[in-house]
Image (cartoon, grey):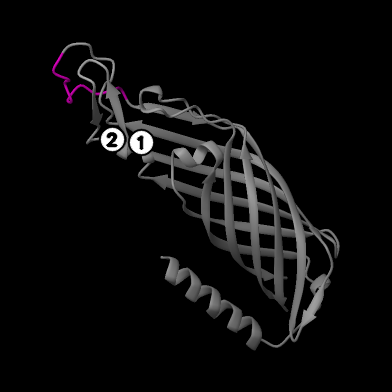
Amino acid sequence: MRKGFYVGFVVSLLVLLCVPRANAQGDNRFGAGVFVDRNVPVLGFSDRYSAGLKYGATFDYRLSNRTTLEFEYHHASLSDGKIEDDAFYWPVDKKWYYSPEAESKFNMNSFLITALSHLGETSAGNLALSPYLAIGAGVYDYQDRVSGLVYPGQSVEPLDEDLLLLPSDDDHTPLGITLGLGMTVEQGRYGLDFRARYHMVLGDLRPMEAWGIKSVFPISMVDLRTTFKIYW
């Protein structure tokens, strides 16, 4: 998947270099794009999951040459949570036990509104380059489900590894904010948007004390994104 992402990026950049330049950047008032990016949990959230993919779509409305409003929907999915490979210590026989049937998955759907503050524009051949600061906010709807964990509160030997905890579900729709830096590369009606940003979601994940996993608040992520856009 990662190799295909880089190949698509190179092909998109070559297309931009080959298309004759049309209107100046400020003449394009609307834009739409699609993206696939790398979603990286950070801080306490990184104790639960490793990086995964996120995909989505954007719609742009350019208020001026310096300010653009971006409306974004994205979906993120993280699976194979780290708890699947964690063991808990059972004090009755002083041994460590794994949960062979453990499954952990995090899904998130979000709608964000972001203000892009362009810091200027430079040209490189037929390309218009514009770095920007991105500040946004929106709604993050997420579900975190953990199932198949062996019940660690047993008190009689031997441990019954078929006795499982009920599945736990954290299902919330909190607000969140984002902060990022990016660069648009435009060639007439076509463009690439490169961005790195931080998400702070004002939601929580419950602790799993037997496995030494603390509660998470806020849920923090960093994403690295490349968006292909068309302007009109």
Residue 232 in magenta stretch: no
Residue type marked 1: Ile
The span from disc 1 to disc 2 (Cα, nearest Å) is 8 Å
Residue at horizontal 30 percent and vertical 27 percent from the top? 88
Q: Is residue 68 above or below residue 178?
A: below
Q: Residue at x 60, y 65 (%)?
A: 227
In the image, 49 versus 120, the foreground residue is 49
- Which residue is rendered at x = 74% and y = 85% of the image? 126
Q: Residue furthest left?
A: 158
Q: Quadrant of residue 152?
A: top left
Residue 51 x, y percent position in the rendering: 46, 51
Residue neighbourhood size for the residue with mark 1, other residues' Cα within 10 Å, grouped as few (<14), some (14–19), many (≥20): many
Residue 147, horizontal then vertical, whole percent: 31, 31
Give the mark nearer the N terminus: 1 vs 2.
1
On the image, the x and y values in percent for residue 186 come to 71, 75
Range of the magenta residues?
A: 157-166
Task: Give the numbered dot on residue 102.
Answer: 2
Q: Amino acid at mark 2?
A: Ala
Quadrant (top left/top right/bottom left/bottom right) for the N terminus: bottom left
Secondary structure mainly formed by the magenta segment: loop
Are dots 1 and 2 in contact, CB under 8 Å?
yes
- Label 1, on which residue? 83
Where is 154 relative to 26, above or below?
Answer: above
In this orientation, which residue lies closer to the viewer: 151 or 77?
151
Q: Is residue 64 above or below residue 15?
A: above
Circle on res. 7 = none
